[in-house]
Image (cartoon, grey):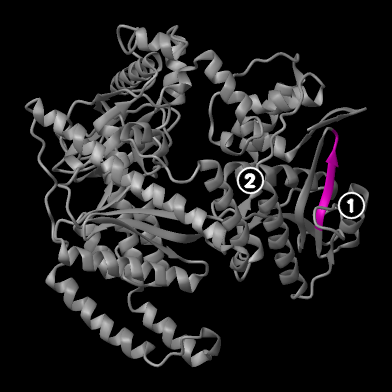
Amino acid sequence: MFKDTAGLRLAATDVSNHLACRHLTELDRAVVEGRRAAPNFRDPMLAVLQQRGFEHERAYLAHLRGQGLRVVAPELDGGRIPADRAVQAMRDGADVIVQAELMDGRWYGRADVLRKVASPSDLGAWSYEVVDTKLAQETRAGAVLQLCQYSQLVARIQGRAPEHMHIVKPGPDFAPETFRVADYGAYYRMVRRRLEEAVSGPAVESTYPDPVPHCETCRWWRECDTRRHQDDSLSLVAGLRPLHVAELQRQGVKTLEQYAREPRPFRERPQRGSPEAYGRAHTQAQVQLEGRQAREPRYHLLPLEEGLGFFRLPEPDAGDVFFDIESDPFAGTGGMEYLLGFAFDEAGRREYRALWALDPEQERLALEAFMDFVIDRWRKHPGMRIYHYSPYEPGAVKRLAGRYGTREADLDTLLRGERFVDLLAVTRHGVQASVESYSLKDLEPFTGYARSLELSAARAALRTVERALELTGPADITDETRRSVQAYNRDDCLSTAALRDWLEQRRAEHERAGLPIPRPENKTGEASELIEERAADVQVVFDRLVDGLPQDRGQWGPAERARWLLANQLEYFRREEKSAWWEFFRIHELDEEELLEERKAVGGLRFVGEVPGASRLPVHRYQFPDQEASFEEGKELFEVGGERVGKVHAFDLGGHMLDIQKNTRSISLHPAAVMVNEHVRPAP
C-alpha cells in the first residue's frame, strides 16, 4: 500500500493482509496517509527468510534454464522488471519472466514468475500463468489470494484469464502445486471488494486489534498488545475464542475484570458457543483477576472428569524421561528436528542428553539413538513414561520414523503402550492458572523452575542456528551458540519435569479431599502375534536387500538405488496405513475446545430431530457452533472417542447443520462430537 498523485495504491499483499487482520489494513492506511508513524520493529528472522526466498527462486530459475527456456530476469536479488518492460517481454513471447511489475489502475503487484503456456491470447498463440516460489510447506489462504491478484493483473494485459496458477516449494524436482484460477475467483473478488471498501471510506478507526495468527509476524504486534492490556480486553482471558468474545460483547461484557465479576458465565443463553465453554472461560477470568490483584501466581483445581486431566497422569517412575525438540520448519526441503534433548534420573542424579542433527543422516541417527535409549530404559523400568509439553514431540518422532523408515516397530510399541504423556493436556483439564497463555514458560512461576539462560539470549542463539541451517551451513554454528541452544533445550526438559512434579502435588490435593484418582493402566505395548511374525519376515528380506550397500550414498549406482527402493517398498502400504491410524487416534484424544479447530471433526453437536423421507435407516439432524470443518457427503463418521455412527448425509458449514445417516447400532446414540474416517484399506 502506498500513495501517489493518483491516490491510494493497493498490492496483492494488502489483500492477504486484509484477510489475516482487518485492523492491519487500517493501521497501514494511517501510515500511508501520514496520520500515524510506522512502528520501529523488524522481525530478525525476516532477512533470513528473504535470503532463503532469493536462493529458492535462483535454484528454480536454474532448473528452468536447464530445460532450455529463455528467462528474462532482473540483475539483482530483490530487483524488478518495470511494468512496461514486463509487458513487452510478454508480447515478445519470453518463456519465463521474473519479478514482473504488473499495474492496473489502483492495483499493482510483482509476480515471482510468469511462465508461458500454449494457450492463445491477445499476445499471440501463447499466454502466461503465474508461479510463486514459497518456502512454507503448507499453502495458506493468503498465498492463494496473492496468486489470484497477480492472475487478474495478467488477465488485463493478455486479454484472457490464466487457467491455472502455481506455487513451487523447495524440493529436488520443483514440482508445482497447481490451482484453477476460477475455483478461487469468487472468494478473491469478495475479499478484494471488502478491502476496497475499507480504504475508500472516511479515515476513522472502526476495527479493534483482536489477536489473530498473523500477530506472530506483524510489525504492529507490540502496539496492539499494549492496547489490549490497556483496555483489559476479553481476549486476554486464556483460551477464550473470538466467537466467545463477540458473544460476550454483544451481551454487554467488555473487559476481563468485568467478566470475572459477573455472577454467571453469561447474561442470557449464548447464540454462539456451548454453555460449558463459557463456564470454563468465566472461572479462567476469575483466577486471572485473582492473581492480578494478589500480584502472585494463583490457581484453581478443575472438577475431575474421567479420562481427562489428572486421570492421564501416570505414577512417577525412576525411569521417566522428559523430552523436548528444537526444530526449524524451513531447513532443507521439509524442515529439520535439529536437536532432540531429554532429561532423566541416573544414580540419584538428574542427567541431560542432547542429540544434535544438522543434516538428514544425523537426523536419522539422532532418532535411532533416542528410540534405542527409551526402549532400553523401558525394559529396565517397566513404569517408564516420556513426558513432553504439547503434541509436537510425538508428532515429530512419527514424521522422522516415517521419513527414514527406521525404528517404526519400536515407535508402534511405545504408542500402543501409551508411553508418551502430554503434560499440556493434563494441565488444561486439571487446573486453571492466572496466566494469559498456557505456555510452559508462563507456568514456571507456579512450578518454581528458574532458567539457566535468559530467554532473550536463547532466542538469539536459536535464530543463529536457524540462519545457519537455512543459509550458510552448519559450519557457521559456533560452540558458544551450541551451548546456548543446548542450555535452552535443557531448561525446557527440566521445566517439563518440574511441571510434572507440580501437577503431582495438585493431584494429591484432590486425593486429600477424598477424591481418589486412578492411575492410567500400565500397558505393555505388545503387538499381536500375527504382526510380530510379519515384521520378522519383512525384516529378514529387508536386511538381505540392503546388505553390503555402501554407507556413502554417493557411491550408489542404479542397482544399489533399486535395492534400497525395493527394500523400503516392503512396508510401503503398512506405513501409509499406519499414518492414517495415527491421525485417527490423535483426533480421538482431542478435547471439546481442540475439536473446534480440527477440520476433520465437528464438536458441540446438538440433536435437532429426524429428517423425514429417509430410507430404512434414519437420518438425524444436528446443529453445531461456529468452527472449522470439512466434511464430504458419504464419508464414514465415528463418534470422537467411540465407535462408528454412520455416514455424512448432508453438511452445511454456514448453516451449522450436519445430517448423519445412522447405522443399526447407533440409532439411539446422539454423539457430542464426530470425526471423518479417511482410512482407505490397502488390501484390495
Percent coordinates x, y for residue 122 in the rendering:
86, 53
Report if residue 159 lies within the magenta region. no
Task: Locate residue 208, reporting x and y percent.
Answer: 59, 19
Considering depth in this image, is 49 or 496 the residue closer to the camera? Answer: 496
Q: Secondary structure at mark 1?
A: helix
The residue under label 1 is 87
Tell me if I can see residue 582 in this picture: yes
Identify the residue at image location x=52%, y=59%.
482
Task: State left or right for residue 241 relative to residue 671.
Answer: right
Query: What span is in magenta?
Result: 98-105
Left or right, 467 with respect to 421, comes to right
Viewer-nearest residue: 474 or 105: 474
Q: Residues within 10 Å of mark 1 (few under 14, many from 20)?
A: many
Marks 2 and 1: which is nearer the front?
A: 2
Q: Is residue 232 above or below residue 490?
A: above
- Marks 2/1: CA–CA distance: 24 Å
Which one is in front, 614 or 250? Answer: 250
| Residue 666: x %, y % from top left | 16, 40
> Is residue 520 shown left or right of residue 604?
left
Q: How many marks?
A: 2
Q: Which residue is mark 2?
A: 143
- Which residue type carries mark 2? Ala
Which quadrant would residue 475 be assigned to in this image? bottom right
